[in-house]
Image (tube, rainbow, N blue to C red):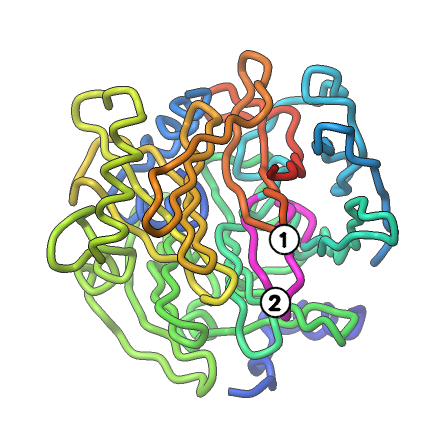
Amino acid sequence: MRGLRQSLTRHRGLRPGVLTSPGVRAGLLGSLRALGLLAAVAASAVTFLAGCSGREARPADHGTAWFQLHAGELQPAADPAAATPVARRPWTVQSRVADFAFLGGTLYCAINGSGLASLERDFSGAPRFTYHADPPIFGHRTITTLIPRQGSLAAHVYFNALLNDARQQDLAIAGISLVSYVPRQTDYTFLIPPFQKTNPDWEAVGFAAESENSFDFEWKYTDASETRFAYTRYHADTNAEETVDRSTFLAALGVPAIEGPDVPSTLAAFFSTCLADMPSLAPGASVQFSLRSKESPVKRSYRSRKDSESAVDVPLFEEEGKLFALLPDGRVLVAEPASPPQERPLPQLPPGFRYTDFAKWGQSLVVSWEEVSFTDVGRAGLLVYTLR
């Protein structure tokens, strides 16, 4: 990595090529920002108030194992109430689990500010993490999305100038938005879209993955006198890129409906069930359902309203025709074909803590949790919860 960083320094932080492999917050963050809803990120968080060492914890008899993030590593904890207090930081830079993705059957967690952690079980079945950290790359940047692509993982990152504890000019590496990880390699590499190579001072504040190789960007440039935006579609397999308009970018963020011809009937029925089990939304608020699966490289998003003042993100997981939804109050709703939905309440969190996202991992749910105070996050970690 030393040679790569020296090259980056000489070229304003830009790698002079692309990876040579073949060829609200994550999705919600991009959606809210693209819709001009920066404040909705905080509103969503308030609503939810509504390499390589392995650490392990034996699941309790009731099938739960708690972990708290310390210095970028998930260490066993009795529960969030007993977790060690940490200094609050903006959610954009705090150490927290920002996204999940499967690659080759392995579940990866995006550790904000640090890098990636892969999750497996030891011989006794206890969770074990392996870390792939690089703070000079990920420090003071926000990870929004992980995308599996052709034996690698791509991570979208950006520098949030408003909610940060560092200056952009102090970053060790500049001019990056897509970081790529290959399990067989030691170091991270970068995918540099042509627009970014030409405009290293622009930040990719919005991101939408259409497929494992097609990514839409919202670029932002700000100085003391002006703010400008640009939109492109980048093809990672060919390094080709074309200019698109804002409406094309917005369309890539997801379907602005939760029923109708653009929404599969099975999903529409499940969305309706989820809404019926949730408290009434505040006026002007919307719900965004973000659906991931082990097989699909990208998440699919559906919004209850095309435009809204704030949004509540409801993560979903699909596995072999079965649908799981993490509701804002900590209940998991499970729907199987030809069966009525069932509730699976997660362990109750202390006041000020909320579950934020999850993935189905074998017979367990891997659920991220955070201590939230408006735009700040304190303690954060994971719950590995065995389904009965």
Place of residue 50 in the rendered image (x, y in percent of width and height, measured from the top left): 41, 21
Q: Quadrant of the C terminus?
A: top right
Q: Dominant secondary structure of the magenta stretch?
A: strand
Q: Residue at x 24, y 23 (%)?
A: 281
Q: Based on the displayed image, in which of its 4 quarters is residue 96 positioned?
A: top right
Q: Is residue 162 visible?
A: yes
Q: Residue at 67% x, 62% y: name it.
A: 106
Q: Secondary structure at mark 1?
A: loop
Q: Secondary structure at mark 2?
A: strand
Question: Over which residues does the magenta segment extend?
Answer: 98-115
Dot 2: within a 10 Å radius of its alpha carbon, few (fewer than 14), some, or many (20 or more) residues? many
Q: In the image, 304: left or right of 172?
A: left
Mark toward the start of the polypeptide (2 vs 1): 2
Q: Residue 349, how many percent across, how many down?
A: 58, 19
Rendered view: 318 above or below 176: above
Identify the residue position indicated by label 2 in the image: 103
Which of the two marks, 2 or 1, is nearer to us in this view? 1
Q: Is residue 255 left or right of residue 129?
A: left
The residue tagged 1 is 362
Q: Quadrant of the N terminus?
A: bottom right
